[in-house]
Amino acid sequence: MKKLVSVIALVAALSVSANAQSLFETLFSGSGSSSSANSTVSTITNIVSGLAGTVYSAPVSLNGTYNYGGVAVSATSSEGGVLSNLAGTAVTSGIETKADEYLAKVGIVPGAMSFTFNAADNTFTLNVLGISLPGTYKVGESEKTVTLTFGKTMQYFCMTGTLESSMSGAKMLFPANKAMAFIKKLVNKIGEKSSEVAAISKLADGYDNYKIGFKLSK
């Protein structure tokens, strides 16, 4: 009961939508069974988790220099027919930590890489370990998606992903297959072997909608 009241209090404090309010009212109607109450608690918990992951979802204005702060990961999992967003959980944090360890072995660590965006002409430069890789970028859908198109030095590699604000700055997340192709090209460009990189794609085996990208801070 204490757990139930705590969850309800948190939902109220976050000013959730009418959908969550309806669930709140259902809990106090006295007509629900124990099983339906448990189901409602589970549903509200999922809503709260979703809200927690979108607190910092304000549009990101890409301009200036953003420093690489580590790997960012997003994934979903389906348990008991319920699809859960695992962003910001112990699961994704564990994957990010392990991915950081793999990239550290090839020299890609916080401080060794940065993106400089020029909003005036939509160009950017990725600086990694003293190597500059230029390209162009496009932000769309209310600044929630980003497309990076590299120049000749990266064989005009292009990838589109999501752009999210975060407490430290921003996150760029790309579909895993595209992100891994980019990381392999990047590792080869700095003269390292990509054997460590292959292991990153296996870290989220068993999860759905796996995305990987970068944590960025100004």
Image (cartoon, rainbow, N blue to C red):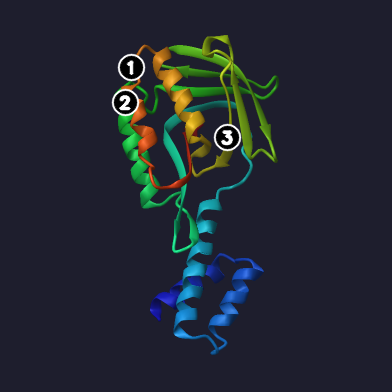
Can you tell which quarter of the image residue 3 is in?
A: bottom left
> Disc 3 residue type?
Gly
Q: Given contact means CB atoms under 8 Å apart, are the residues at marks 3 and 2 in contact?
A: no
The disc at residue 161 is 3
Q: Secondary structure at mark 3?
A: strand
Residue shown at the point (40%, 15%) measured from the top left: 188
Query: In this view of the protein, which residue sits in the foreground, 119 or 159?
Result: 159
Identify the mark nearer the N-term, 3 or 2. Answer: 3
Q: Position of residue 100 (x, y in %)?
A: 34, 33
Mark 1 crowd level (few <14, some 14–19, many ≥20, 10 Å Cα): few
The residue at which mark 2 appears reads as: 196
Identify the mark nearer the N-term, 3 or 1. Answer: 3
Considering only vertical position in the picture, is 122 above or below 172?
Answer: above
Query: In this view of the protein, which residue sits in the foreground, 204 or 153?
Result: 204
Mark 2 crowd level (few <14, some 14–19, many ≥20, 10 Å Cα): some
Residue shown at the point (33%, 39%) measured from the top left: 97
Regarding residue 54, the answer to whether it shows in the image is yes
